Image (tube, rainbow, N blue to C red):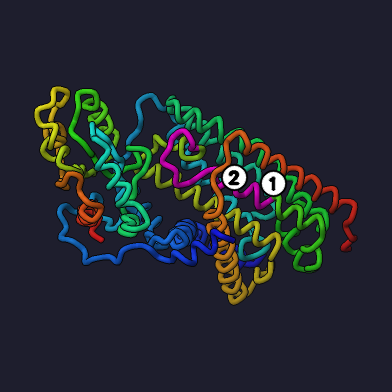
Amino acid sequence: MSALSIVAAVLQVVVVLVGAPFVVGGMRQVRARLEGRAGGGVGQPWRDLRKQLRKQQVTPRGTTLVFAVAPAIAAGTTLLIAAILPIFALGSPLDSVADLFGVVGLLFLGTVALTLAGLDTGTAFGGMGSSREITIAALVEPTILLAVFALSIPGQSANLSAIVSATLDNPGQVFSLGSVLAFVALVIVIIAETGRLPVDNPSTHLELTMIHEAMVLEYAGPKLALVEWASGMRLTVLLALLANLFLPWGIAGADPSLLAVLIGVVAIAVKVSVLAGLLAAGEVFIAKLRYFRVPELLSGSFLLALLAVTASYFLATPTR
Amino acid sequence: MTWIGKIRRVGRIVEPAPAAPEPTVAPPTGVRGSLQLRHVDAGSCNGCELELAGAFSPVYDAEQYGARLIASPRHADGLIVTGVVTHNMHEPLLNTLAAVPEPRVVIAVGDCACNRGVFATAYGVVGSVADVIDVDVQVPGCPPTPDQIVTALRSVTGK
């Protein structure tokens, strides 16, 4: 492991920290333009975050430590995932300590922390949001596991860098049946996990229709900034994972040069912007699904992931 | 494909932005162009609500100046209050204001909120918004036009 791959891993975390609000802002801007509005601009989430960080911290009466530490856990797990994932360089120093299962576990830890915080406030909307979020999470996490498991069969490893480098060595497998099925399943679960339409509406004002927002209604000031930052980073990290699992070209190798890292940064910025733009443009055409129909969508994606595992197990061409 | 056709046909319908108005109060935290507001209807006839919806519609698009209506007073930088304060909404208004983290602004929209308007002598009325809580910006009119509301919001966001 070279010094530069450590630098690259640190840089990954910094780029995700700085870039995530711009991803959210860009998605809002795409939506605003398609609606005929001018929009607040790509920098609007950053302005909101700077303002929230300067505001008074309000702690609701009766809340405990669970409420106080949840934003830090949600943001911390997401940052750890950003350090582990091959975002713009393979072979992060943390790559060997956490494989695919570790990453999904970390994602779930962040979700559970916010869910418990929603319950901790003791309000009706907090509990309702938590119950909805955990229902969706329970359907989403197995699908992520299965879908990436299907992708790990050709590379014969659950290590994410190994999966990505297997795709780099053998580009044809992106268009295999298992891979295409896994792609569709992953897109659906990423939309559900990050609370986008049609599963959840991130800009809703109606408490009764909220899922993610309902849990965080009681946060104020710096803690709210942390929660919103974390949800933006989670979206960015998952989009980057999706991009690199299926289109890994441009990513720096395990022992990168400085130029390769820079190319990797530009490549992932382009990939995530395109994916986020497509997601935001797609959202304009759909309405939120009725909550009781969301499990149908998610079990559909679970089925696709299961078929992807079966297909890649039986139809896989041995790569080595 | 009708939706795509509609998006292309309609294009941008937002009104061109006029010159920024004189600031009335400084942006609450010193960050310009970010103002999240919780709307409280203290006893309005819903005339002001319609105009408020107009101010955040694609035509006037107050979001381009950084103002946004949000769901929770804890996420807000201030309140936007419409209507005269009735007995039933007196306490909820005070509670909502207490839930907004400092520093905060209060914007009273419409004649009723500013000076009781047509409900001046009604029996269920506590008073205007300024009688109950400190008001930073007043938007007169019955109801005020979306233009006036947007101008008042811009005088706070500073954008």
Image coords of residue B77 (percent x, y): 28, 45
Q: Disc 1, disc 2: CB below 8 Å?
A: yes
Range shown magenta: A186-210
Residue under label 1:
A144
Q: Quadrant of residue A205?
A: top left
Nearer the observer, A74 or A277: A277
The residue that appears at 54% across and 53% down in the rendered structure is A283
Label 2 sits on a secondary structure element that is helix
Mark with earlier residue (1, 2): 1
Chain letter of the residue carrying label 1 = A
Left or right of A79: which side holds B76? left
Query: Is residue A105 shown above or below A61?
Result: below
Residue A193 badge: 2
Q: Is residue A208 magenta?
A: yes
Query: Is residue A221 shown above or below A42?
Result: above
In the rendered image, which quarter contains the C terminus of chain A? bottom right
Label 1 sits on a secondary structure element that is helix
Left or right of A300: which side holds A35? left
Looking at numbered disc 1 in the image, what kind of residue is underneath it?
Answer: Ile
The residue that appears at 23% across and 39% down in the rendered structure is B81
